[in-house]
Image (tube, grey):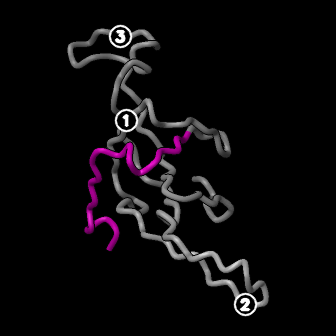
Amino acid sequence: MIDTSKIIIVGDRVLIKPEESASKTNSGLYLPPGVHEKEKVQGGYVIKVGPGYPMGVPVEDDEPWKERKPIKYFPLQAREGDYAVFLRKEAVEVEIDGEKLVVVPQAAILILYRDEDLLA
C-alpha cells in the first residue's frame, strides 16, 4: 500500500490506481500489449484528491502590510475510495513506491461510483 501522507495533489487533479487490464478476452483470446493503450476509457480507484478549483481572491498589493487571506477552494466531486471511469488520453502515468498510478484532472472523469457501505 502506498503511503499517501507525503503526497500532495495540486488543484483539480485526482490520483487514481488504475485497474489492471485483462490480457485475454472473455472467449479466451490473448490480446497483444498495444491493445490496452488504444482504449479510450479506463477505470480505477481514487487514492487521493486535490483541494479543488481555486476561487479568486482580490489582489491587494497596494497595502503590503495587510494580512493576506488564505485561498479558498471549490471542492471536487471525487473522494478517496471512489471508483472512477476516466478518459485515458487525459491521464498522466506516474510510479510511486513501485506502483503505477495516474494523475487525472477532474474534467476527464466521466463517472464516479461511491459505495457508502464500504466506507462505513
What's under tag 1, amino acid-wise? Leu
| Quadrant (top left/top right/bottom left/bottom right) for the C terminus | bottom left
Compared to residue 33, the image places residue 7 above or below, namely below
Residue at 41% in and 51% down: 106
Badge 3 density bin: few <14, some 14–19, many ≥20, Cα 10 Å: few
Q: Nearer the viewer, residue 20 or 12?
A: 12
Residue at 38% in and 59% down: 78
Q: Position of residue 85 (x, y in %)?
A: 32, 42
Residue 87 got which mark?
1
Q: Is residue 81 magenta?
A: no
Compared to residue 11, the image places residue 38 above or below, namely above
- Secondary structure, mark 3, is loop
**Residue bearing mark 2:** 66
Q: Which residues are magenta?
A: 101-120
**Residue bearing mark 3:** 30
Residue at 50% in and 53% down: 13
